[in-house]
Each structure stands twice: as structure tokens, then as C-alpha cells.
Amino acid sequence: MDIGRGGTIVAFPGRAPGQVCFTREELQRILDLYGRMVAAGEWRDYAMDFSKDAATFAAFRRTAERPQARVEKRPALRNRQGMWTLFGEHGQVLKRGHELPGVLAPMERKLVKVVES
């Protein structure tokens, strides 16, 4: 949402009302990891999807493949196991949590191993 003239709240153009999205800080953190994985030669492409239930960032080794990693923000799960989930290449849940940095930790560790090799 954006505050227009006179203090009226107006939906941002191109964004459906009630759509889940990443905040600027969240997206910056995800794209920072993506950039480092690209530099390490692990990832080459990404896709984002936004719906009324979830925002998803998927990273690909090759465009035609299924994503190597997928980060999902699902606010409805905030008070349960946490709104953040990291999925692996075959759809398995690698990590769930309430904080994005903790959920991205397995990918950060993988990056350290790739750089050390």
C-alpha cells in the first residue's frame, strides 16, 4: 500500500490487494545470497511468485530445471512453526522458522563449502 495525497491509502499499481510480498530488507537479504551463489557458480536464474497466501523466491542452477532452492514466506503460519520455509530441490523442507536469516543458514553453509572447495 502507498499513501497518496491527503493521507488516503491507495494500492500500489500492479499489486493485487492482500497479496503477500517480501519487504525491501527481506528481498535484499535473499538477493544478496543469490548474488553470492551466482558468483560461486551454483545458481544462474531465479523466479518470484506472489499470491494472496505466500511469496516465493526460487533459485535455479539451470532455467529448464526445477528450483535448487525455494524460500517461501507464508504469514498465516507466523504463530505456528514460523512464516519462513526453505525447500530443497525435491520439495523437501530443509528449514522452517520465524526469522529469515536462520532459515537461510543452510544455504549460507553450503556457500561456504563451495567457496572452500
Image (spheres, grey):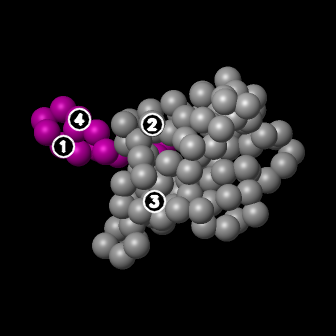
Q: CA distance from mark 4 to mark 3?
A: 31 Å
Measured along the vertical axis of the image, is residue 113 above or below residue 41? below
Q: CA distance from mark 1 to mark 4?
A: 5 Å
Residue drawn at point x = 36 percent, y = 54 percent: 99
Residue 105 location (% of width, % of height): 50, 48
Measured along the vertical axis of the image, is residue 62 above or below residue 55? above
Q: CA distance from mark 1 to mark 2?
A: 31 Å
Which of the two discs, 4 and 3, labels the residue nearer the N terminus?
4
Q: Amino acid at mark 1?
A: Thr
Q: Which residue is mark 4?
A: 4
Residue density around tag 1, few if under 14, some if 14–19, many if 20 or more, within 10 Å: few
Residue 65 location (% of width, % of height): 84, 49
Instruction: Examine the rendering and report whether any part of residue 45 can be seen.
Output: no
Start-end of magenta stretch: 1-16
Q: CA distance from mark 4 to mark 2?
A: 28 Å
Q: Amino acid at mark 4?
A: Gly
